[in-house]
Amino acid sequence: MNITVLQTFLTILDAGSLIRASAQLNVTQSTVTARLQSLERELGQTLIKRDKSGVSPTAAGLRLRRYAETMTGLWQQARQETALSKSMNDICNIGCHVDLWSHLGRQFFSHVRVHAPDVAISVWKGSVAEASHWLDDGRTDVLLNYAPGYKAGQVATPLPPDRIVLVSTDPEAPMRFDPGYVYVEAGEEFGRWHAAEYADADIARISFGSSDLGLEHLLAVGGSAYLPDRIAGPLVRKGRLHNIKEAPEFERPVYLSVNSDAAENWPWLNDAIAALG
């Protein structure tokens, strides 16, 4: 098994067909087919189902996909780190939940960029599960997430929690039964709290998987939503959004986790963490 074959397997899944995969990889379709067949022979499993609508992974293909993404990601990281210029002494791979990037993620990135000029930086953004997985498999060294790192060798520092508040483009919007209300995903605990607090309300017609998307919708179309105060607050102060009076609030824990082995030679790390408080 080699990295090229795994990359081809992932490209087939992402492209949805062998023809599109061959075009993206700039090789012939027969080459793509040969690489897939060699991988299937090596594993003794059929990995891809083909039909008129395209391709889809088998159960074995789904299981392999996670490992293939990890292996190819680590290979890309290894190539990056071994190719560092002479002016760079180290690399810091930052993982960040998508909803934390615009504030805490950028702040941490900027601190490293300014105060550690001999450190190369890469950034990965994803969901809670994706970001945690990147820290666990070593693809990232630092993680800003709504869940702490639990494994041995990982140190988690609690940061000020996200205060989730109800805001609207209409200062007179009701706390309940607003037809323009959109649900913005903020974790399982928030989902349970929201269901209990608004048990008498209908399910929102529109929902978003991140606060950035929810905010973009409110500013473009109008309506109300629960959003982190750190992104809604500046717009409230400008009068573009309005806090809904007497609406209940929710706090979502935030953590910065570090793989200790990677960070043991980072004298700037403690100051970078302190700057986030």
Image (cartoon, rainbow, N blue to C red):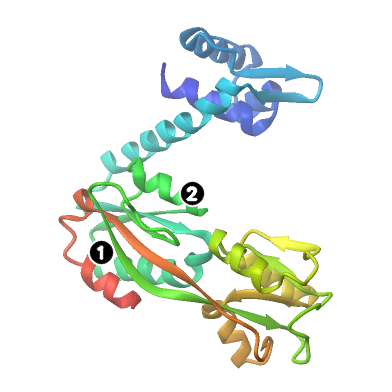
**Quadrant showing the C terminus:** bottom left
Sort mark 2 into few (<14), some (14-19) or many (20+) by Cα contacts within 10 Å: few
Instruction: Please state which of residues 142 and 192 is positioned toward the viewer in this rendering.
Output: 192
Decide if residue 222 is on the left or right side of residue 259.
right
Q: Amino acid at mark 1?
A: Pro
Examine the rendered structure and indicate whether residue 99 appears above or below residue 241. Answer: above
In the rendering, at what x and y percent does residue 107 appear? Answer: 39, 72
What residue is at 57 percent from the left and 64 percent from the top?
A: 186
**Quadrant showing the N terminus:** top left
What residue is at 29 percent from the left and 47 percent from the top?
A: 151
In the rendering, at what x and y percent does residue 262 appear? Answer: 22, 50
Instruction: Please state which of residues 85 and 119 is positioned toward the viewer in this rendering.
Output: 119
Instruction: Please state which of residues 94 and 172 is positioned toward the viewer in this rendering.
Output: 172
Q: Which residue is mark 1?
A: 117
Examine the rendered structure and indicate whether residue 249 appears above or below residue 129. Answer: below
Sort mark 1 into few (<14), some (14-19) or many (20+) by Cα contacts within 10 Å: some
Q: Which residue is mark 2?
A: 129
Decide if residue 98 is on the left or right side of residue 133.
right
Under circle 1, the secondary element is loop
Q: Amino acid at mark 2?
A: Ala
Q: CA distance from mark 2 to mark 1?
A: 31 Å
In the rendering, at what x and y percent does residue 230 appear? Answer: 51, 79
Q: Which callout, 2 or 1, points to the residue nearer the camera?
A: 2
Asked where in the image residue 189 lies, by quadrant, the reply is bottom right
In the rendering, at what x and y percent does residue 254 appear? Answer: 42, 67
Give the mark, 2 or 1, whose residue is nearer the N terminus.
Answer: 1
